[in-house]
Image (cartoon, coloured by chain):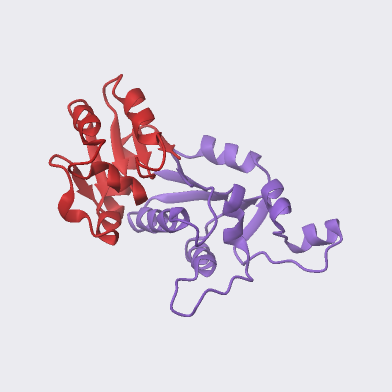
Amino acid sequence: MLHIINKSPFENNSLLSCLRVASAAKGHAILFIEDGVYGVMQGTAVEKSVRDAMANMAVYALNPDLEARGVQGRVMDGVKLVDYDGFVDLVAEHDNVQSWL
Amino acid sequence: MKFAIMINEGPYTHQATDSAYLFARAALAKGHEVTRVFFYHDGVNNATRLTVPPADDRHIVNRWSELAKAHDLDLVVCIAAAQRRGLMDENEAKRQGKDANNIAPGFRISGLGQLVEAGIQSDRLVVFGD
């Protein structure tokens, strides 16, 4: 399943809720878009949670949204950057998509 | 592959409708089919043709109308959400005794069943919202 996070982890609990569910099983991936991209920054309060989750699942971030916020240079190692084409491919590659609004 | 898209956020609010539009465009460019775009909750405000953004800003409503025209997209607005927010087509305005309608070209008003149907008939349902 592909999980989509579009909210900053400092705005609500979607990211941590998502990580709790998604880490429980194999085969999950997370895509960070919109203000959600603050969840893949280095040195934040959620970095450890995201890093722990990366042991089990692939983590992606939408590069145009990182660039719009000027934070593309502060992304944690191991996060794969995609554009909208890559976003479409991720949706196609996973059987289900869950947006954590 | 068949994609259905759901939009729950109004235009010029955060980013949901922009993300959805760019996603839909990328999917179409890659040869996928967008079976339906369903506008729900404040998302119905993406469908008013009376929208007049500043000249240097993107025109979110026209952008959807143009994409629908180019790719024969089915843009569906939830009727209950539309009634609450004053979004009308000609029939609905007549039925409610209103003196005007405001739905943009390419959009149509229908029920939540259209969302369920889109979910069943598509390979993926991608939700954008607040």
Q: Residue furthest top?
A: A24
In terms of image quadrants, where is residue A59?
top left
Q: Residue furthest bottom?
A: B55
Point out residue A19 in the picture as x, y percentages from the top left corner.
32, 28
Q: Residue furthest left?
A: A77
In terms of image quadrants, where is residue A66?
bottom left
> Residue at horizontal 67%, vertical 64%?
B103
Shown colour of chain B: purple
Shown colour of chain A: red
Asked if residue B96 can be seen in this view, the reply is: yes
Relative to A88, is B3 on the left or the right?
right
> Residue at horizontal 78%, vertical 57%?
B92
* Residue B14, above or below A80: below
Most foreground residue, A72 or B101: A72
Point out residue B94 in the picture as x, y percentages from the top left corner.
84, 61
Point out residue B105 in the picture as x, y percentages from the top left corner.
61, 67
* Residue B2, above or below B70: above
